[in-house]
Image (cartoon, helix red, strand yellow):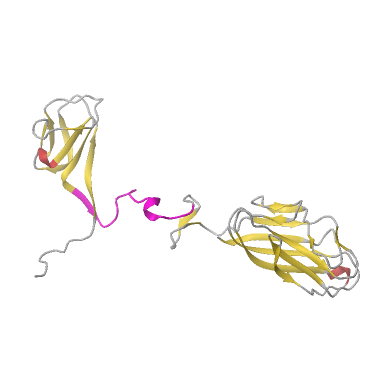
Amino acid sequence: MSYIGTPPSNAFTALLKQDFSTSATTGYTLDHAVNNANDIALFINFVRQEPTAAYSASGTTLTLTSATASSDDMYCVYLGQALQTVNPPNASVGLSQLTASGTKDATTFLRGDNTFAVAGGTNTPLVYAYKNNTQSVANNTATEIIYNQELYDTGSAFDTSTGRFTPQEAGYYQVMAWFRLATGTDLENVEVVIRKNGSAISANPFSSVHNDSYNTAYISSIVNLNGSSDYVSAFAFQYSGGSLNIHSNGNGFNAFKLIG
């Protein structure tokens, strides 16, 4: 036989509670009308009182057999009346229920994969470094470029003594690097390489450069960094047959976070 009547709904149920401001009196007003003393559980100083013996209740009138003191703590729970809703009670769901990972604060939001991610799109950490001195690059030798000056470095992630970018936030980063050779000789074989932890991940080989006005090699790549130990840096190659200097200007290193 099918169910007759209104189908029951799945819902969260929470018993209603009322706190009282006590004074030297036996009479109090209930927030909700009741039939008798058995419809509420009354607690005074955290001790449950016996219905009809310690108090009586009818409608919204609560009457104690002995007066309270202003220092007493008194509250009641409505046993015959409950608040029912299809939503969980306010503040009843926490991180332990969500099993969400990440940091919950004013800058993050809860994503569909149950992780807290940084809101917005600030693209930080962000660094822009450059050189204001020369640096020798030997023939056919990988030379790590030391960008010794910073225009900005929002996360203190760039080391001007090594030319290495080590962000402390995990994510995918856009990395760009370029250098300029101080030579008036036409060159047909120059490379700028981006290395992650010392291993090449992206290179722009055979960048044809002609005379001192245009001898700049450039590269751009997207790199995934772990936010702790991973670092990236740029390396210069040249195949002129002898050593050449990187010019004291016209060089740069730029990196910023794309996504987490």
The image quadrant that residue 50 belongs to is top left
Q: Quadrant of the C terminus?
A: bottom right
Magenta span: 82-102
Residue 213 vs 151, above or below: the answer is below
Residue 50 vs 120, above or below: the answer is above
The image quadrant that residue 145 belongs to is bottom right
Q: Quadrant of the N terminus?
A: bottom left
Tell whether 224 sits left or right of 62. right
Tell whether 141 sits left or right of 219. right
The image quadrant that residue 46 belongs to is top left
The residue at 14%/28% (across/down) is: 26
Observer-nearest of 171 and 201: 201
Tell whether 97 sits left or right of 201. left
Residue 222 vs 83, above or below: the answer is below
Prevailing secondary structure of the magenta residues: loop
Where in the figure is residue 167, as x and y percent of width and height?
Answer: 63, 54
Where in the figure is residue 198, as x and y percent of width and height?
Answer: 71, 61
Observer-nearest of 113 and 211: 113
**Magenta-drawn stretch contains 180:** no
Observer-nearest of 189 and 220: 189
Residue 58 at least partly seen: no
Observer-nearest of 64 and 205: 205
Where in the figure is residue 256, as x and y percent of width and height?
Answer: 64, 60
The residue at 70%/69% (across/down) is: 202
Residue 51 at least partly seen: yes
Where in the figure is residue 124, as x and y percent of width and height?
Answer: 61, 56
